[in-house]
Image (tube, rainbow, N blue to C red):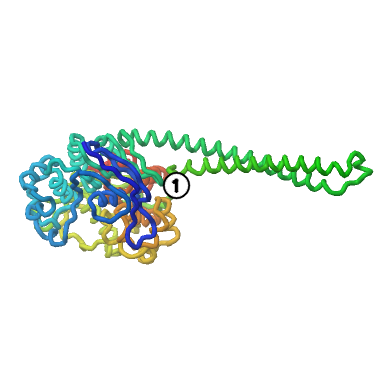
Amino acid sequence: MAQISVSNLTFSYEGSYDNIFENVFFSIDTDWKLGFIGRNGKGKTTFLNLLLGKYEYKGTISTTTVFDRFPYDITKEQMERCAAEFIEELKSQCELWRVICELEKLHEDAEILYRPFKTLSPGERTKVLLGVLFSGENDFLLIDEPTNHLDQETRKNVKQYLSAKKGFILVSHDRDLLDACVDHVLVLNRQTIEVQSGNFSSWWENKQRRDSFVKAENEKHLKEIGKLKQASERSAAWADKNEGTKIGFDPVKEHDRNIATRAYIGAKTKKMQSRVKQMEKRINREVEEKEGLLVDLEQPVDLKLMPLSHHKETLVNVRDYSVTYKGAEEPAFSNLTFSIQKGERIALHGENGCGKSTLIKMILQKAGFMEKFPGRFPDGKPVLTESGVCETASGLIISYVSQDTSMLKGGISGFCAENNLNESLFCAILRQLDMERVQFSKNMEDYSAGQKKKVLLSASLLTSAHLYIWDEPLNFIDVFSRMQIEKLLLEYQPTMLFVEHDVRFREKVATRVVEL
């Protein structure tokens, strides 16, 4: 067992005027199965890169551990080649047979190693990179969101693998994965960092208790401050009034007063003013105690949605529908039958490559969405043949969230203008999803993956539509925002078709599951 000790760590990106980390201290053991939790943009991926020595920083990170990190960076040149040809470039002394064994554990055929990497689906690419990562021994693994794009079966396999392994840091927003795999958590709170034993659920339960206690303490301090202020104001007013009676009096009405009474009044006033100063000190002390209470309190704002009501009950009708890509031996899916009724929230479910995203794109085409927004699909229309029925209601307005964020470039203002969005409302939704205002002045290509996804989700939430189609909307989205979105969808109950592998989200939100 070794330790990773972080002392006085301070880091910010070049050209940025906000620190990601500032004077941070903590220690972790390398035999822990450590879950890394925090809001999008708080620096989880950045910290993994600091461990790998990719950036210069102030302070110290001391360890004797050898690291390996997922996901690997794939170059444009490697994208054109088969993975079998470049796995040693990703991980030194990586043996192909070991990768094939790991792919078998992930229930994936080894033939994907011999296809050009760019032709693989996002899920297949993830499995290849996980196979390379798991093929080594004795490395301390830095695993950044391994289950994005993975189907439920593969997530189970990853969960089982990690459960049996020690020595890793797992960045994930998948509550089910964290509960199954980790025995400690490292949490980036709003202003502090904590290390705690247990999994996500035990930490979340502790946090809810702590937040409830903090709220109660805050209310107690506010009441005490209010009482002290009222007493202080009364005493100060009395002292000022009394002080005004020192000089000048009516000998007829105040026959018991004389010139010597002035000293007595002055002494009483001085005593009262001293009491006022003591009250002010108590008020300041109460304020100081209160100020530190709420720094890490999570109070997600309730989001709003403006779904439209269509005149037809059936918005999408799919009957005996099959789609086959040209040149493919097997159809992406076949004989599919289902419909989307008003008010339904349908989850598409199935293994990677079963055609979920293809079906979504075909529905978007039938509704005229792809022609209206051609820039959203850099690959253009799928080259395929179809049979059966896939039809949408006339005049159907769709709000779409793609699983791809690579098209996001430039600033917020340009994005809003291009998509006919009210910029102030758009930024307000981003703030509600806990995006810092400082991010609004940056280019979107500099955002974290989770922040980019929040841009697409905010645009969708701001768009009134009959049907909301979301393709893996929660990839990279932090746990707190996931809970916000769950609450929103259950409250407003829009008509939806979505693909999401987060089991807990799907179980809470979906009214029906369609298996492909």
Please state the horizontal and vertical placement of residue 169, each as a whole percent of the image.
25, 42
Q: Which residue is mark 1?
A: 301
Quick check: 71 above or below 372?
Answer: above
Q: In front here: 476 or 385?
A: 476
Quarter occupied by the C terminus: top left
Residue 399 visible somewhere in the drawing? no
Q: In front here: 264 or 444?
A: 264
- Residue at left 63%, top 43%? 280
Q: Residues within 10 Å of mark 1 (few under 14, many from 20)?
A: few
Q: Amino acid at mark 1?
A: Val
Please state the horizontal and vertical placement of residue 27, each as a whole percent of the image.
30, 40
Q: Residue furthest left?
A: 97
Please state the horizontal and vertical placement of residue 145, each as a whole percent of the image.
25, 46
- Residue at left 44%, top 42%? 297
- Residue at left 35%, top 59%? 395
Please state the horizontal and vertical placement of residue 437, each as a whole percent of the image.
42, 57
Q: In front here: 198 or 394?
A: 198
Number of marks in the rendered image: 1
- Residue at left 69%, top 44%? 233
